[in-house]
């Protein structure tokens, strides 16, 4: 099969004519093109009046070699890579001591699925509830100001990304095409097929819920077990090897192999692991606000006359500004046509994030506008970044009025440095509510200064970005894990054998897809290690 990349066609080019364009590109007749699939479809909207669709095509022709001979130095006509996933092990009989996965977010889910598919019958422990019950608890915060610290946006079946935009792309290097395996499994579990070929796929929150339930059923059918409301509170380490786990119920679980897929918000578990001596170190992350604009403004700025074209969908953006004080300000986790959500998991703290439905049809666009920070901003032990996050989340709670409302300010007032007292044309979407104030003391001064400088600079890229009435809500602190549980080449903890820190919480992923990919990697490393240990006995 031949892969053609960068096949650029006008937005208006009819999809029915695609075979003609492919055949022309390969210098063959349409009859000689036996079949083709669209591997990816993206767009280039840098020129608003000349938006082009950019295809990656896998074409089946009679003689690959003859075609390739015509394009000896063309980097965009090559043999299609083999993306088939191959298991590294297959057990006929489940091991006596089953591997345990802590956490059932995308990382734990993919690790659990792959281990189950290889016959390892993993046990998965998740502190939160099943996704439907969890949904009710999450809405209790959004609608009734009631937080359940064990069942919320961060904790429960499906992990942190369940109430999200469900964006499924990532910048990670993926030479073994694990990302494809993740997407294929998601489609099998009910995700829309288009996630396999659009360049910036997303699922939206409702579909994610169903998909997660289907994947749970698949793991169980393969002999895996998922135990909900089972928080791991201690680890048993003997002679530098993990030997078991203790649960909040007091139950002890014997195991020699544990994947820690905790996510970035398991602060009590981070503290426990630090106290037990599991190696961890500080890591940079970012802090800032959510910004909301009318989606129509973003569509117009990015797509001009093509705004509303179904092939383009609701427009997104990606912005970066290097501030005079040396800080980088950038847009993060942009959610077109979505809403800002209350994402705290701790009592007396406020955290913002964003989500959307598949249709991305809500009135507002939202994105994090965040500033990069490094351990020199929060010196101390590996947990210092986590305490730093807490400090600003508590401050946001206070500024928001102490009932989980988010502190908010109009962009125009923020730039001028005056408190907001009245909303303008943009109605913020954060529930349970937004308390207008002055955000100047909601983050460190260097972050406020950098964001104040960045917003007008972003106006140069997106007309209307610094509109007076756009709304900032704070604070966005959980952009990634504040620490890394460093692993060796065998993907085990540097100082505890049998322990595989993984996913976002361990500092090895940032997003649903990369967490899923990391889950596959650690599942393979664990399986290989277990097979070797069996062989040595
Ligand atoms: P998590 O998904 O955080 O899962 C960790 C799980 O471990 C949790 O379910 C938790 O309950 C459990 N756990 C923690 N401690 C314990 C313990 N002691 N015992 C037992 N269980 C425990 N990413 C994207 O790519 N696209 C998006 O559109 C997107 N939108 C987002 C929107 C929101 C509102 C949020 C909060 C995040 C979003 N993200 C998005 C980020 C994405 O969700 C995370 O990167 C991803 O979920 C990380 O996966 P993970 O499996 O490593 O950790």
Image (cartoon, grey):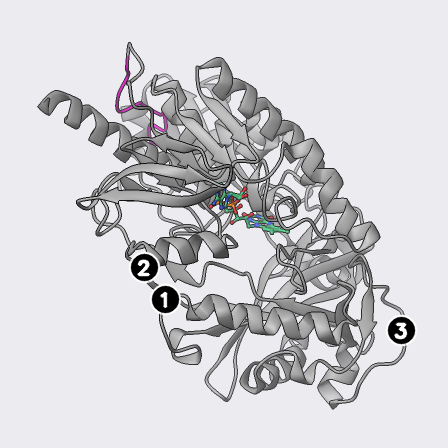
The residue where tag 3 is placed is: 424
Say which quarter of the image contains residue 476: bottom right
Q: Secondary structure at mark 3?
A: loop
| Residue lying farthest to the front in this orientation | 250
Q: What is the number of callouts on the image?
A: 3
Residues packed near mark 3 inside 10 Å, few (<14), some (14 to 19) or many (20 plus): few
Viewer-nearest residue: 98 or 239: 239
The residue where tag 2 is placed is: 280
Query: Residue at point 22% right, 49% down?
Result: 488
Q: CA separation, marks 1 and 2?
A: 6 Å
Q: Start and end of the magenta stretch?
A: 78-91
Q: Which mark is residue 382?
A: 1
Where does the image place residue 31, in percent across and percent down from the top left? Answer: 49, 17
Residue 466 shown left or right of residue 432 in the figure: left
Q: Nearer the viewer, mark 2 or mark 3?
A: 2
Viewer-nearest residue: 43 or 217: 217
Query: Residue at point 52% right, 39% down?
Result: 105
Residue 269 shown left or right of residue 280 in the figure: right
């Amino acid at each position: 099969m031949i892969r053609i990349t960068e096949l650029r066609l006008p937005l208006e080019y009819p999809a029915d004519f695609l075979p003609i364009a492919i055949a022309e590109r390969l210098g063959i007749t349409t009859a000689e093109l036996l079949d083709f699939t669209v591997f990816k479809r993206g767009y280039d909207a840098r020129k608003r009046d000349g938006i082009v669709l950019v295809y990656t095509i896998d074409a089946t022709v009679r003689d690959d070699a003859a075609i390739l001979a015509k394009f000896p130095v063309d980097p965009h006509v090559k043999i299609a890579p083999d993306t088939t996933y191959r298991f590294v092990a297959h057990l006929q009989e489940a091991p006596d001591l089953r591997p345990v996965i802590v956490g059932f977010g995308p990382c734990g889910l993919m690790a659990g699925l792959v281990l189950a598919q290889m016959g390892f019958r993993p046990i998965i422990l998740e502190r939160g509830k099943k996704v439907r019950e969890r949904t009710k608890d999450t809405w209790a915060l959004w609608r009734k100001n009631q937080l359940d610290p064990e069942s919320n946006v961060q904790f429960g079946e499906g992990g942190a990304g369940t109430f999200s935009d469900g964006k499924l792309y990532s910048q990670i290097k993926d030479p073994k095409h694990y990302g494809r395996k993740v997407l294929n499994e998601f489609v099998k579990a009910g995700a829309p097929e288009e996630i396999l070929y659009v360049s910036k796929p997303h699922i939206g929150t409702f579909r994610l819920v169903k998909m997660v339930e289907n994947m749970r059923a698949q793991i169980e059918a393969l002999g895996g077990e998922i135990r909900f409301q089972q928080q791991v509170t201690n680890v048993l380490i003997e002679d530098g090897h993990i030997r078991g786990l203790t649960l909040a119920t007091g139950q002890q679980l014997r195991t020699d192999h544990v994947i820690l897929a905790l996510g970035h918000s398991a602060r009590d578990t981070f503290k426990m692991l630090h106290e037990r001596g599991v190696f961890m170190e500080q890591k940079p992350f970012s802090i800032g606000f959510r910004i909301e604009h009318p989606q129509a403004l973003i569509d117009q700025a990015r797509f001009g006359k093509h705004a509303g074209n179904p092939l383009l969908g609701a427009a997104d953006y990606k912005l970066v500004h290097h501030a005079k004080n040396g800080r980088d300000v950038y847009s993060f986790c942009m959610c077109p046509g979505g809403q800002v959500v209350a994402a705290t998991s701790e009592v007396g703290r406020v955290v913002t994030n964003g989500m959307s439905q598949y249709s991305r049809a809500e009135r507002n666009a939202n994105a994090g506008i965040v500033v990069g920070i490094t351990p020199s901003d929060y010196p101390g032990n590996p947990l210092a970044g986590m305490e730093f996050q807490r400090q600003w989340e508590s401050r946001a709670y206070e500024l928001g009025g102490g009932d989980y409302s988010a502190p908010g300010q109009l962009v125009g007032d923020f730039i001028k440095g005056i408190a907001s007292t009245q909303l303008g044309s943009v109605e913020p979407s954060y529930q349970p509510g937004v308390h207008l104030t002055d955000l100047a003391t909601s983050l460190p001064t260097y972050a406020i200064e950098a964001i104040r400088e960045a917003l007008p600079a972003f106006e140069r890229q997106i007309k209307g970005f610094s509109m007076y009435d756009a709304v900032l809500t704070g604070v966005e602190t959980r952009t990634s894990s504040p620490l890394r549980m460093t692993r060796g080449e065998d993907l085990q903890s540097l100082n505890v054998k049998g322990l595989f820190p993984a996913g976002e919480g361990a500092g090895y992923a940032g997003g649903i897809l990369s967490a899923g990919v990391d889950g596959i990697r650690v599942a393979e490393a664990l399986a290989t290690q277990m097979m070797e240990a069996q062989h040595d006995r």
